[in-house]
């Protein structure tokens, strides 16, 4: 494999834009260390003086910004070569510093909550910048308990991480799927989480079946343990929700970002209405694959094969730029500047982290890591990650550091909107039916995995929490039956759901981060809605990109014309899914 030193500089990111060299990193590191000690010494116990409060908040913003820069630099350097011991050490150092900083600054919010509302109103009137920040802290007030109770809850947190940690250990360290023989090759490889899905995409059905059965056999062997871990996890959620006086686990988890519960229920209800379209697609799958019975191991195999066409990176840039032109000439110019001035690390090299992401820190430009391999999928990844990057670029440019980063609820919208614009551009400009079929298949699968599947997950975890809230024990039978019934309702009667597919829930790590995955589905719907508005020419999308977290996520989206408390955006996205399936039907 290519060494990093052999790759042309123009295809590598310029981390020097963060720190010219490692010595300067060290200098800032020492400074943050010293400043955070000073913050505790100078401000702790004194925040009821409003001038002191102002100084403390200003200082803490500065520390947060510097720390962010130290953090991303260390990790992105490590990602250039995961075997680099120096940067491995640097990342450990900065992780340690980060936990010190958050511990030492943890006095700030409780002290603010102890200040009277009248005083805080005075403070906010003088310091506009902090208005939303303070408002948000005050919103938590009714769920904050007495200092003694808070102390108990803080200690209980150390126990509460148990289920997630235990599942992580089981699922990443102790689980052992054994070896699997590769088709047409006389060799066997270790079956892992990493290669499971790519094996599920194999055209060899016998192989898929073997992999599937081998993989789930291991979960079946651990079924009682995993049931016990998950039940403990749900009970833990209920303990915290009840103790903090929320009426449900769902409410407690959505409260932080101020997302109304109606957003969650509305998503599930609206997706239910469009399940027949997914059933239809499953029927089509069965037909195209030519099988008499469709199994869960037949779900991932692409119905159209990857195009042979190679797309060089320079060509990919041109395609993406043209596709994103509806976002405005200035958007594309800025994007082009980013593409050519060290934002991106393009190619794979020995030791480089796999996958793709966008990252960075306030005060500098965003960075994108790719492992570009000249495939059409890589062009979509480029459009996706640059969507994140431009969202960061505009938010960081417009907002003060306090509100510069967008929330998770908004995080996947700009990236998916870019992918949607790209697919619409390619469909508009290509009449070749094989190419169109490939594009349609690619996008249909995204809908299935992001909108339908994540909503099904969201519904499963909602039910699991409701069982516990209603005093029903989460037995293995109940969890499996719940999952089985959902599988059947979502996918329809064309699939055979056996014991292996009933226990799929056992392998999903996201279930230990409750009420999180629905945001993939809402984000996907919002992105489709926004892409349509952008193409219609009437939108204030730029304002959306510039908003950061300066308002509540739901408000930011409403302002851009997308109201996630109503069925409309989800319905529109699913209508578009139906159009894609209908055209695809005619092509295969
Ligand atoms: Zn993304």
Image: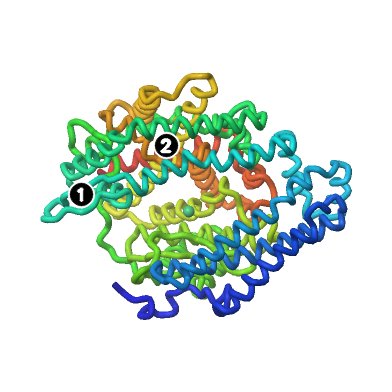
> Residue 354 occupies which quadrant of the picture?
bottom left
Query: Residue at image x 45%, y 30%?
Result: 231
State which quarter of the image contains the C terminus.
Answer: top left
User: Is the shortest distance between ligand 1 and the CB of mark 1 under 8 Å?
Assistant: no
Tell me the element at label 2.
helix
Q: CA distance from mark 2 to mark 1?
A: 32 Å
Counting from the top left corner in percent of width and height, residue 493 is at 29, 26
As drawn, 88 above or below 5: above
Q: Badge 2, how many Cα within 10 Å: few under 14, some, many 20+?
A: many
**Of callouts 2 and 1, the N-terminal one:** 1
The residue to which callout 2 is attached is: 452
Query: Residue at image x 53%, y 52%?
Result: 535
- Please indicate, yes or no, whether residue 538 appears anywhere in the rendered image: yes
Compared across the picture, whether 531 is left or right of 241 comes to left
As drawn, 308 above or below 211: below
- Please indicate, yes or no, whether residue 489 appears anywhere in the rendered image: no
Compared across the picture, whether 126 is left or right of 445 comes to right
Q: Please tell me the numbered disc located at residue 72.
A: none
The residue to which callout 1 is attached is: 179
State which quarter of the image contains the N terminus.
Answer: bottom left
Q: Nearer the viewer, residue 241 or 425?
A: 241
As drawn, 443 above or below 399: above
**Callout 2 touching callout 1 (CB < 8 Å):** no
Counting from the top left corner in percent of width and height, residue 318 is at 43, 68
Number of residue marks: 2
């Amino acid at each position: 494999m290519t060494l990093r030193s052999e790759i042309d500089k123009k295809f590598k990111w310029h981390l020097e834009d963060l720190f010219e060299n490692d010595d300067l990193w060290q200098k800032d590191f020492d400074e943050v260390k010293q400043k955070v000690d000073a913050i505790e010494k100078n401000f702790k116990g004194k925040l009821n003086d409003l001038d002191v409060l102002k100084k403390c908040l200003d200082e803490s913003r500065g520390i947060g910004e510097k720390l962010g820069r130290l953090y991303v630099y260390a990790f992105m350097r490590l990602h250039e070569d995961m075997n680099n011991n120096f940067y491995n050490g640097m990342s450990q150092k900065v992780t340690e510093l980060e936990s010190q900083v958050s511990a030492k600054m943890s006095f700030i919010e409780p002290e603010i909550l102890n200040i009277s509302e009248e005083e805080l109103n005075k403070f906010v009137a003088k310091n506009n910048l902090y208005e939303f920040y303070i408002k948000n802290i005050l919103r938590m007030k009714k769920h904050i308990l007495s200092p003694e109770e808070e102390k108990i809850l803080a200690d209980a947190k150390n126990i509460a991480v148990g289920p997630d940690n235990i599942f992580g250990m089981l699922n990443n360290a102790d689980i052992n799927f054994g070896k699997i023989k590769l088709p047409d090759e006389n060799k066997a490889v270790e079956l892992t989480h990493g290669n499971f899905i790519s094996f599920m995409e194999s055209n060899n059905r016998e192989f898929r079946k073997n992999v599937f059965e081998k993989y789930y056999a291991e979960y079946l062997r651990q079924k009682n343990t995993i049931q016990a871990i998950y039940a403990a996890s749900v009970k833990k959620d209920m303990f915290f929700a009840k103790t903090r006086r929320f009426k449900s686990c769902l409410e407690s988890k959505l409260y932080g970002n101020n997302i109304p519960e109606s957003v969650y229920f509305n998503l599930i209800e609206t997706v239910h209405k469009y399940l027949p379209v997914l059933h239809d697609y499953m029927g089509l799958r069965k037909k195209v694959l030519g099988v008499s019975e469709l199994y869960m191991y037949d779900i991932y195999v692409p119905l159209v094969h990857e195009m042979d066409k190679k797309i060089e990176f320079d060509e990919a840039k041109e395609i993406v730029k043209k596709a994103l032109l509806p976002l405005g000439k200035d958007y594309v110019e800025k994007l082009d500047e980013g593409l050519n001035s060290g934002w991106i690390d393009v190619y794979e090299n020995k030791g480089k982290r796999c996958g793709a992401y966008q990252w960075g820190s306030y005060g500098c430009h965003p960075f994108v890591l790719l492992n570009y391999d000249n495939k059409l999928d890589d062009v979509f990844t480029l459009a996706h990650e640059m969507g994140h990057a431009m969202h960061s670029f505009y938010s960081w440019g417009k907002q003060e550091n306090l509100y510069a980063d967008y929330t998770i609820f908004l995080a996947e919208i700009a990236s998916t909107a870019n992918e949607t614009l790209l697919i619409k551009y390619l469909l508009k400009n290509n009449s070749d039916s094989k190419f169109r079929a490939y594009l349609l298949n690619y996008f249909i699968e995204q809908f299935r995995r992001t909108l339908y599947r994540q909503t099904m997950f969201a519904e499963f975890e909602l039910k699991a929490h409701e069982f516990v809230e209603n005093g029903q024990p989460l037995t293995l039978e109940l969890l499996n039956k719940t999952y089985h019934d959902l599988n059947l309702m979502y996918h329809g009667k064309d699939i055979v759901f056996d014991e292996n597919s009933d226990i799929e829930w056992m392998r999903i790590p996201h279930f230990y981060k409750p009420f999180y995955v629905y945001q993939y589905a809402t984000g996907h719907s919002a992105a489709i809605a926004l892409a349509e508005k952008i193409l219609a020419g009437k939108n204030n999308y730029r304002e959306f990109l510039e908003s950061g977290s300066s308002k509540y996520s739901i408000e930011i989206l409403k302002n851009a014309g997308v109201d996630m408390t109503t069925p409309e955006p989800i319905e529109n996205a699913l209508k578009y899914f139906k159009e894609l399936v209908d055209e695809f039907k005619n092509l295969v």
